[in-house]
Image (cartoon, grey):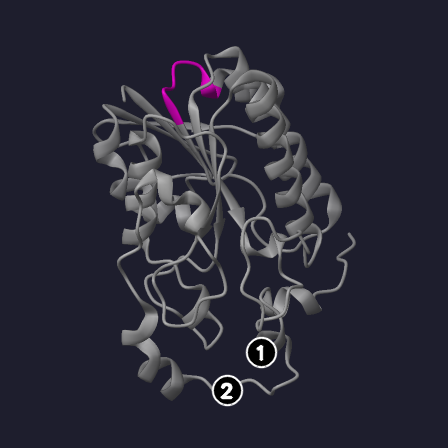
Amino acid sequence: MKRLLITGAAGGLGRMMRTRLAHMADTIRLSDLAEMEPAGDGEEVVQADLADEAAVHDLVKGCDGIVHFGGVSVEQPFDPICDANIRGVYNLYEAARANGNPRIIFASSNHTIGFHTQDRHLSVDDPMKPDGLYGVSKCFGEAMASMYHAKFGQETALVRIGSCFPEPRNHRMLATWFSPDDFVSLIECCFRAPRLGCPIIWGVSDNDEQWWDNSAARYLGWRAKDSSARFRNKVNAENARPAPDAPDAVYQGGAFTAEPIHRD
């Protein structure tokens, strides 16, 4: 690609992927509402608010692909979630439609299905059961992507990210862990595929504990290679096992299921 846009570049995922995705385009355009590190070689840094329609149109202009990490990534009051994750997603898809439909990697979340219990093995056809306002906003984003694909041919990979960190931090993450290397290989595969469509893909590594079935996305040719198994002893040593009735032990969304509705 000539120019790849990464939104949410000041966030955890954005900072992690900034250099890891640098090989994918001549220029990486990095955007966030928050301040970012200055542009390096082959980078453009653009501060923009996803809720600002004109700013998002300018942001997408000239881009061949988009990795959309931008928006609120935790449970918050409705207004900030609405601005960033609902209005912002609408602005992004309208901007993409006006600029040739560049392929999008959309960072969805396991919190779209967080109230499913951990004894369930889910396919992409299982119903959404969001565990909070953040999860609801990601359900909206998936629906928006599906509509723009059906109506306008906009291709999007809807990646329901589990827990993307250098290593799992607790017992639940032994099942949800998504290694950064596996995420990079998935992004590479989604941009390389001759036909992407609008698949839901579980963003998870090849862990021993599996809650999610990725067989519907096998046509892309992607396979996770890492596993949380090598971290199991460390997780056990550093974390007390949650009580059997604790949200982290019952629900796939873990502690998000116990979050209150936050109000300003």
Task: Please give the residue where the numbered disc 1 appears in the rendered image.
Answer: 249
Q: Which mark is residue 77?
A: none
Region rendered in magenta: 59-65
Are there few (<14), some (14-19), or many (20+) residues within 10 Å of tag 2?
some
Q: Disc 2 marks which amino acid?
A: Arg
Considering only order in the chain, which callout, 1 or 2, is on the residue closer to the N terminus? Answer: 2
Name the image quarter holding residue 228.
bottom left
93 drawn magenta: no
Compared with 235, 137 (above or below) is above
The residue nearer to you, when weighing 117 against 5, is 117
Q: Disc 1 marks which amino acid?
A: Ala
* Residue for point 58% across, 78% down: 249
Task: Please give the residue where the numbered disc 2 appears in the rendered image.
Answer: 241
Residue 210 appears left or right of 179 = right
Given contact means CB atoms under 8 Å apart, are the residues at marks 2 and 1 in contact?
yes
User: Nearer the viewer's eye, disc 2 or disc 1?
Assistant: 1
